[in-house]
């Protein structure tokens, strides 16, 4: 029966060899991890969580991680490269000593209950690529020094209470994803990081106009999410010509006009939402020339005049069209109702004549005649419909 003893003996030897082979953590990094854990309220650390396994009687970087530091921290050659917490409702602050983890590549404490400021010292982490603090209660301003964290590729601080103006982030040349949605940011958009693919600033209190100096270099921008802010002024035509742009969401702002230029031949623009603004003027017929555009929402503005016949011309890619809640008049182009309900959306709550009740697009009724007469200064005068 002696072979029953040799198996545990071999296992112990193996564990010993692995432990001996793995590097131990740098003392200042261990101190930083200790400070990190002590900034989290013990009562918010459930026994089954990653942080509960952090026991500083042991080396944070020593393998195997069977009973201690089993998760939350990853080392490479004795240096901490990742601090990725589980989502457990950890409540605490983020220690400025985090900057002692000088090889840190990823810091992710998302979906917990961290509060207090984002330490400015984070900016001194030269290898930090992913900073993910989303869904917590961080407050105060985004430190301007963050622009020095040159390795950042993802900055996700969505759903916190970050206030004040956005600092100039244009030095962050590796940043591809910036998400600060659902915070309390104010002021105008600064110059933006030039290589962004995704800019998400939904539901803040940003104001001012969209300026070329913010966007001019953003040739890789695919998603622009700026809904639910207080942006005003005109949407300039160059915005629609950013070469990689696929989605624009500027709904629920205070924008008063939009100009749309003829597209570049390789335009990738798929979806535009400008609903719930204060847009005046006629519907830009140029939207119909964007060869990839499938979804156009301009609901609840103050748009007037007829729906351009081009919106329903043969070969149109438009599949979702939301124009309800404006003062559009004339007869909608009949092409919208043929093609077996290819186009969904709404044309209701306008001043349209002959919107066929059988069409889903016309389910919502039109405005009362009195309101339409008022909007058109007496008599509704639809523009003559061009021949299609
Ligand atoms: C850490 O581990 C040591 C040795 O196993 C143990 O005595 C101590 O209670 C542990 N500390 C905590 C905070 O769990």
Image (tube, rainbow, N blue to C red):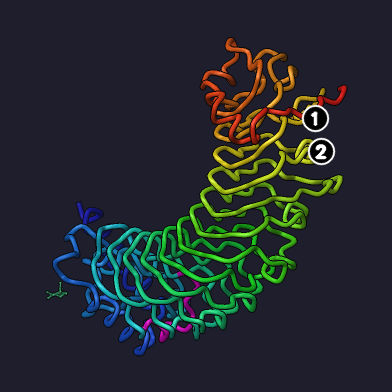
Residue on which disc 2 sits: 289
The CB of the residue at mark 1 lies under 8 Å from ligand 1: no
Q: Is residue 314 magenta?
A: no
In the image, is 54 to the left or to the right of 296? Answer: left
Mark 2 or 1: the one toward you: 1
Q: Position of residue 43 (x, y in %)?
A: 14, 66
Front one among 161 and 59: 161
Disc sitting over residue 310 in the figure: 1
Instruction: Residue lying at the far front in this picture: please name it.
Output: 378
Which residue is at 60% across, 24% downward?
344
Q: CA distance from mark 2 to mark 1?
A: 8 Å
Q: Give the magenta-colored segment's residue range.
A: 97-106
Quarter occupied by the C terminus: top right
Q: Position of residue 181 (x, y in %)?
A: 47, 58
Image quadrant where residue 122 sits: bottom left
User: Vertically, is 29 above or below 211?
Assistant: below
Front one among 200 and 322: 322
User: Vertically, is 132 above or below 292?
Assistant: below
In the image, is 126 to the left or to the right of 74? Answer: right
Quadrant observed for ligand 1 in the rendered image: bottom left
Disc sitting over residue 296 in the figure: none
Total marks in image: 2
Q: Position of residue 149 (x, y in %)?
A: 55, 80
Mark 1 lies on a secondary structure that is: helix
Front one among 107 and 264: 264
Which residue is at 55% across, 56% downward?
226
Please say if the residues under marks 2 and 1 sit with CB atoms less than 8 Å apart: yes
Which residue is at 78% across, 53% downward?
241
Q: Is residue 100 magenta?
A: yes
In the image, is 60 to the left or to the right of 319? Answer: left
Which residue is at 34% across, 64% downward?
85
């Amino acid at each position: 029966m002696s072979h029953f003893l040799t198996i545990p003996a071999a296992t112990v030897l193996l564990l010993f060899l692995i432990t001996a082979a793995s590097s131990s953590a740098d003392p200042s990094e261990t101190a930083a991890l200790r400070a990190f854990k002590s900034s989290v309220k013990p009562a918010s650390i459930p026994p089954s969580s990653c942080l509960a396994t952090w026991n500083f009687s042991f080396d944070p970087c020593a393998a195997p991680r069977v009973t201690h530091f089993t998760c939350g921290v990853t080392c490479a050659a004795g240096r901490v490269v990742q601090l990725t917490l589980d989502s457990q409702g950890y409540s605490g602050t983020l220690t400025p000593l985090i900057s002692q983890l000088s090889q840190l590549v990823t810091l992710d404490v998302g979906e917990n209950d961290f509060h207090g400021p984002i330490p400015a010292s984070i900016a001194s982490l030269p290898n930090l690529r992913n900073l993910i603090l989303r869904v917590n209660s961080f407050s105060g301003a985004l430190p301007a020094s963050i622009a020095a964290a040159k390795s950042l590729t993802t900055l996700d601080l969505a759903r916190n209470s970050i206030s004040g103006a956005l600092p100039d982030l244009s030095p962050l040349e590796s940043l591809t994803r910036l998400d600060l949605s659902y915070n309390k940011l104010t002021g105008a958009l600064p110059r933006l990081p030039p290589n962004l693919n995704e800019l998400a600033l939904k539901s803040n209190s940003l104001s001012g106009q969209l300026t070329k100096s913010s966007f001019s270099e953003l040739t890789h921008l695919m998603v622009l999410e700026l809904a639910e802010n207080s942006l005003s002024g005109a949407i300039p035509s160059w915005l629609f010509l950013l070469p990689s742009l696929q989605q624009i969401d500027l709904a629920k702002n205070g924008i008063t006009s939009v100009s749309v230029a003829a597209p570049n031949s390789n335009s990738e623009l798929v979806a535009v939402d400008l609903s719930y603004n204060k847009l005046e003027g006629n519907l830009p017929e140029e939207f119909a020339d964007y060869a990839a555009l499938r979804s156009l929402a301009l609901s609840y503005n103050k748009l007037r005049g007829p729906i351009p016949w081009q919106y329903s011309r043969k070969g149109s890619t438009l599949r979702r069209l939301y124009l309800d809640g404006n003062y559009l008049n004339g007869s909608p182009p009949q092409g919208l109702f043929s093609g077996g309900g290819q186009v969904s959306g709404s044309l209701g709550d306008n001043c349209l004549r002959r919107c066929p009740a059988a069409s889903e697009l016309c389910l919502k009724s039109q405005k009362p005649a009195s309101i339409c007469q008022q909007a058109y200064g007496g008599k509704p005068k639809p523009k003559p419909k061009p021949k299609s």
